[in-house]
């Protein structure tokens, strides 16, 4: 039997029992819709999580800490294979050595320090974070209110939205206003022995911290200081979040400005009570690679230098595993409705055999082979699967849009940013339609085999 004749005959048979076949096709559509809706939820949540992580600008970033620091805080080292002589200080020499590694764009310290912000005669405690100029293009500041820093040395600040709400009920009105940051500056004892400068308003109290080995070179004092900054932008997320940082930054300033302030940080107290090489040391360093594909090789090189590393690629491995299992469970539950639709296809085709015994008998009497009869029922099952798959994908897409709209409406009422929790990529559309066709063909196996076994003489006698 020719393919064209076979298709025409199958479509004619489907039109004769249009109500029953339509209901069966609708059952397939509902099953596919539930499958698409659940899988698109898993895909959407995975894309949402990946996008939020990517907006942090850390997918191409390696965060470096000293293994000595971990031991100082009585934490077991995760690098059991490292020999003691390889444990190094994270100082300026190490930073320059890392800058010379292949595929490294820049190496800069993470500068975070607690501060008191004065605005409109009110005081607010927060954490200041230094932001490098390269952060402008990492996506974390896309859609921000206002603008990025005008220059790496500008006395400007960007506020995190929640901190901006603490300062004012209308955060957008803060842009262009000034605030004062009060912090504690490190001042070496050596510089104190130089001729003293005239006392300033912020230099009214000093507390000296010295190292017992070498107070002249390693000791420092802490001096209260103030810095006036102009607010230029407000960002939704916390783009400067880092590993082993002190708290979450909510006020961001250029990294060059943060370095010039010489603000006291957590590691300063640790360095003051132990012997170092006399060079500046860092609690941690951030390394930017040319691309995420280079991160693993850079991590290996830094570990060989005697330091510990962390990257978001390490975290996303577990995240991908979680979402893979999550998608699998959603697919299993979504397939239950498609299983019910499969039973409906079997029932429809079995009923068609009983109603069309005479037709099958005439076909076989005219020379139709068993294979032709099987193909006829397979085509009918495949058409129902194809139509049901297409309609099901459309219904699933509508369900996803409706849920996304309802979710964003709820988030808006909670003063939270919108989120796209559903995503229907092209591969999911094609896979759902193909899966519906395959399931329908499997459901047509038994009816097709039963129809092919009919004896044409008995079929005609039955009529």
Image (tube, rainbow, N blue to C red):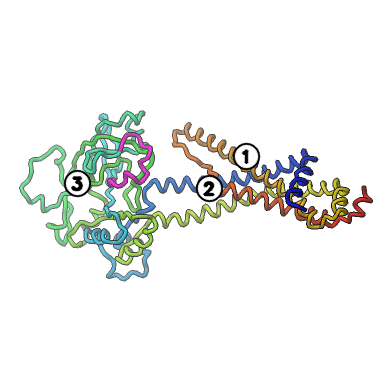
Foreground residue among 218 and 279: 279
Give SS at disc 1.
Answer: helix
Is residue 72 in view? no
The answer to if 138 sits in the magenta stretch is yes
Q: Residues within 10 Å of mark 3 (few under 14, many from 20)?
A: few
Q: Seen in the image, is 281 located left or right of residue 75?
A: left
- Which secondary structure lies at badge 2? helix
Counting residues from the start of the chain, the first of labels 3 and 1 encountered is 3
In the image, residue 336 sits, relative to residue 278, either above or below, namely above
Residue 177 falls in image quadrant: top left
Q: In which quarter of the view is residue 314 placed?
A: bottom left
Q: Which segment did they paint magenta?
A: 131-147
Whether 157 is among the magenta residues is: no
- Per the image, the residue denoted by label 3 is 260
Q: In this rendering, does residue 208 appear at all?
A: yes
Q: Of 228 and 291, which appears nearest the observer?
A: 291
Q: Given this view, does label 3 or label 1 mark the residue nearer the observer?
A: 1
Residue 105 in percent (x, y) is at: 29, 54
Provide residue 351's location: percent of width, then percent of height: 82, 47
Q: CA distance from mark 3 to mark 1?
A: 59 Å
How many other residues sit within 10 Å of disc 2, few (<14), some (14-19) or many (≥20)?
many
Relative to 207, 20 lies left or right: right
Which residue is denoted by mark 1 in the rendering?
A: 395
Q: Nearer the viewer, mark 1 or mark 2?
A: 1
Question: Label 2: which residue?
Answer: 43
Vertical side of 28 occupied by 124: above or below: above
């Amino acid at each position: 039997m020719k393919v064209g004749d076979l298709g025409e005959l199958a479509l004619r048979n489907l039109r004769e029992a249009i109500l029953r076949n339509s209901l069966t096709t609708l059952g397939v559509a509902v099953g596919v819709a539930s499958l698409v809706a659940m899988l698109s939820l898993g895909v959407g949540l995975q894309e949402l999580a990946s996008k939020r992580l990517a907006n942090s600008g850390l997918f191409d970033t390696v965060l470096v800490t000293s293994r000595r620091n971990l031991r100082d805080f009585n934490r077991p080292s995760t690098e059991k294979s490292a020999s003691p002589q390889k444990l190094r200080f994270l100082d300026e020499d190490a930073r320059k050595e890392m800058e010379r590694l292949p595929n490294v764009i820049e190496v800069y310290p993470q500068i975070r320090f607690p501060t008191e912000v004065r605005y409109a005669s009110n005081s607010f405690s927060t954490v200041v974070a230094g932001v490098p100029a390269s952060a402008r293009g990492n996506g974390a500041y896309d859609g921000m209110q206002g603008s990025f820093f005008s220059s790496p040395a500008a006395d400007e600040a960007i506020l995190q939205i929640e901190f901006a709400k603490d300062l004012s009920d209308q955060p957008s009105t803060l842009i262009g206003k000034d605030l004062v940051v009060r912090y504690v500056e490190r001042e070496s004892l050596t510089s104190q022995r130089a001729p003293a400068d005239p006392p300033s308003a912020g230099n009214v109290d000093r507390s000296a911290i010295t190292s017992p080995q070498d107070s002249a070179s390693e000791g420092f004092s802490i001096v209260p200081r103030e810095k006036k900054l102009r607010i230029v932008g407000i960002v939704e997320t916390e783009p400067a979040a880092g590993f082993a940082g002190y708290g979450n930054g909510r006020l961001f300033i250029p990294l060059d400005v943060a370095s010039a302030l010489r603000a006291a940080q957590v590691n300063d107290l640790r360095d003051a009570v132990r012997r170092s090489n006399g060079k500046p040391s860092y609690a941690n360093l951030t390394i930017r690679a040319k691309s995420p594909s280079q991160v693993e090789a850079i991590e290996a090189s830094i570990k060989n230098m005697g330091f510990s590393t962390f990257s978001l690629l390490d975290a996303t491995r577990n995240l991908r595993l979680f979402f893979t299992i999550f998608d699998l469970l959603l697919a299993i539950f979504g397939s239950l409705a498609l299983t019910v639709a499969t039973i409906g296809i079997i029932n429809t085709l079995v009923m068609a055999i009983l109603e069309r015994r005479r037709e099958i008998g005439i076909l076989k009497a005219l020379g139709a082979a068993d294979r032709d009869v099987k193909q006829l029922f397979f085509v009918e099952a495949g058409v129902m699967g194809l139509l049901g798959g297409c309609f099901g994908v459309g219904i699933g897409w509508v369900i996803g849009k409706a849920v996304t709209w309802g979710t964003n409406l709820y988030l808006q009422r909670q003063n939270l940013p919108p989120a796209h929790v559903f995503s229907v990529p092209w591969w999911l559309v094609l896979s759902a339609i193909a899966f519906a066709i395959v399931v329908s063909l499997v459901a047509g196996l038994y009816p097709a085999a039963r129809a092919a076994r009919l004896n044409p003489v008995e079929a005609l006698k039955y009529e």
